[in-house]
Image (cartoon, coloured by chain):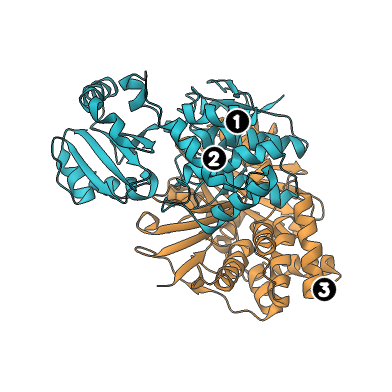
Chain colours: A orange, B cyan
Amino acid sequence: MATYVFGHTNPDSDSIVGAIALSYLKNQLGEDTIPTRQGDISPETEFILKKFGYEAPQLKTSYAGENVYLIDFSDIAQSPKDIKEATILGIVDHHKLGDLTTDTPLECWIRPIGCSNTVVKEMFDHYHIEIPEKLAGMMMCAILSDTVIFKSPTCTKVDTKAVKELSKICGIEDYKALAMEMFIAKSAVDGASARNLNTRDYKAFDMNGTRVGINQLEMVDISVLTPRIDELFADMQKMKEEEGLHTVLVLLTDIMKEGSQLLCISDDASKVENAFKTKLENNQAWLDGVLSRKKQVIPFLQPQF
Amino acid sequence: MATYVFGHTNPDSDSIVGAIALSYLKNQLGEDTIPTRQGDISPETEFILKKFGYEAPQLKTSYAGENVYLIDFSDIAQSPKDIKEATILGIVDHHKLGDLTTDTPLECWIRPIGCSNTVVKEMFDHYHIEIPEKLAGMMMCAILSDTVIFKSPTCTKVDTKAVKELSKICGIEDYKALAMEMFIAKSAVDGASARNLNTRDYKAFDMNGTRVGINQLEMVDISVLTPRIDELFADMQKMKEEEGLHTVLVLLTDIMKEGSQLLCISDDASKVENAFKTKLENNQAWLDGVLSRKKQVIPFLQPQF
């Protein structure tokens, strides 16, 4: 019986590439695993897969009775609905410890660093398994994406070292140029619906019993979205009602200006204002220097609830 | 501000030695940590500390506002009461994933192997930090204890390899002889009260909403306890009432005969009989081959509730 390896719902590049990389490693170690995904591929991930000639993992949303490895999450909210009927053999992650539990011993490789693929790189080194050239390229892109080309406060020396080693393996010296290409692909908004934009990197959080949805769009230049702000707000209002959320936030993160335009629809916007020590104007605020949802948004918002 | 490193309530040798070893490693890596313990030292741990000339870590049961590393557990039930007011920087463990969660990213080194000290050994290797001779001896003893000198089904190749490497570092070639000495120290029951015996390696479990307490006494020869069985049962009944437990089990594990005499006080003993496919006589049964609570008891008992 094969074991499935997958990342969180609404997968980002770290989740998709991480599933492929971890599955490859486990198979080299003699296990029989298959990488899968819980949702659609983002434009950024599509760019990475195409660049290195990989197929997207198969879509699979139900895992009852299966053995699984999880990558890039440890929360029930980001799991398949039947995760409690699966056997979790391991978790590879770089987030806070979530509310998943197991009935049997497992392996967890969780580190407070910039990217799950950096943890997978550590695992390859630990087991002395060689990383194939094109897989190394994908892992490098995932790390450059999660760390916003090393600009994110989540980025550590371990991440930059991993990128440098992976760049040697895949033979791409100018990885910053490749990363810019990738972020330009990620920034493509032509033809995308407001809902598509509002859910590209959307995660729902349970903040001490209150549901808060937060989306982040990382772009090379967020001004291309200025004509569409009203449309985004209208859709955020709909999402709030559909999902029964207290607050919906969208972070338009400008990776060149190094900050985020915050869009906020909330039952009590003062909580958001207090969290970021700012005043909203037309439900918006510029958060200078804010690039990381995990490190610069969640920890300040959570105590407000 | 120092960071505290400690194991579970009612600490065993793995928890005590693991706290000392992990604290030493973290300090070598430039952190400022102090090993502590949540409860009394067992006779086995005392033997190990004395043998290698270490002091017991200081007793500390409150950690509000502190940074902490946890070793050998990830359950709230085995944590200090104010664990939610502490910041968990990391968890090193070899059990099932418990219900502790964090607000911030952390490091987790959790492996499905025989002993937390084997995981700490892996960490020393990962960081290329030398293990002092006497610390290596203590870590070796902790692994030999948790794996019942490699006889436990929880024991893996990683554990045996770690013991062999640690035995070279500490210069003790005949580690099996030392382990027997240690288990003889652990088997000392003279002068111990029934309550002391019933709680030497006692853990309370929440089994789908039902509270079950399980103690395990690993001994070189369990027949020395035969004259005291009635006394143990009387105290188990008291523990059941005091703690509002559905079931209290004591496993008298004979490491030479490689099996456990099960003592059972329960509101519904049929659950225990079904779990182990056995019939209790005078509230007792011999479970042949059963050495591991974690692998041979919990996974069979839990589905009965």
In three-dimensional space, the C-alpha distance between marks 1 and 3, rounded to whole angstroms, equals 55 Å
In the structure shown, which secondary structural element does the residue marked by tag 2 occupy?
Answer: helix
Residue under the point 54% across and 40% down: B178
Q: Which mark is residue A250?
A: none
Q: Mark 3 lies on which chain?
A: A
Q: Nearer the viewer, residue B299 or B176?
A: B176
Q: Looking at the picture, does residue B53 appear above or below residue B98?
A: above
Q: Nearer the viewer, residue B133 or A174?
A: B133
At label 2, counting other C-alpha atoms closer than 10 Å, the crowd grade (few under 14, some 14-19, many 20 or more) is: some
Could one spot residue A232 in this view of the protein?
yes
In three-dimensional space, the C-alpha distance between marks 2 and 1, rounded to whole angstroms, equals 10 Å
Q: Residue furthest bottom?
A: A53
Q: Which of A185 and B240 is in front in this view?
A: B240
Task: Look at mark 3 in the image and give the residue it sits on.
Answer: A172
Task: Give the number of the mark in front: 2 or 3.
Answer: 2
At label 1, counting other C-alpha atoms closer than 10 Å, the crowd grade (few under 14, some 14-19, many 20 or more) is: some
Q: Which amino acid does label 1 sit on?
A: Lys
| First-in-chain label (2 vs 1) | 1
Q: What residue type is labelled 3?
A: Ile
Task: Look at mark 1 in the image and give the residue it sits on.
Answer: B51
In the structure shown, which secondary structural element does the residue marked by tag 3 occupy?
Answer: loop
Q: Mark 1 lies on which chain?
A: B
Query: Picture coordinates of residue A157 (x, y %)?
Result: 79, 51
Residue under the point 49% across and 49% down: B114
Query: Picture coordinates of residue A232 (x, y %)?
Result: 59, 55
Q: Looking at the picture, does residue A85 appear above or below residue B191?
A: below
Q: Do the residues labelled 2 and 1 touch (CB within 8 Å)?
A: yes
Query: Picture coordinates of residue B42 (x, y %)?
Result: 47, 27
Task: Look at mark 2 in the image and give the residue it sits on.
Answer: B178
Looking at the picture, do discs 1 and 3 lie on one chain? no
Q: Which amino acid does label 2 sit on?
A: Leu
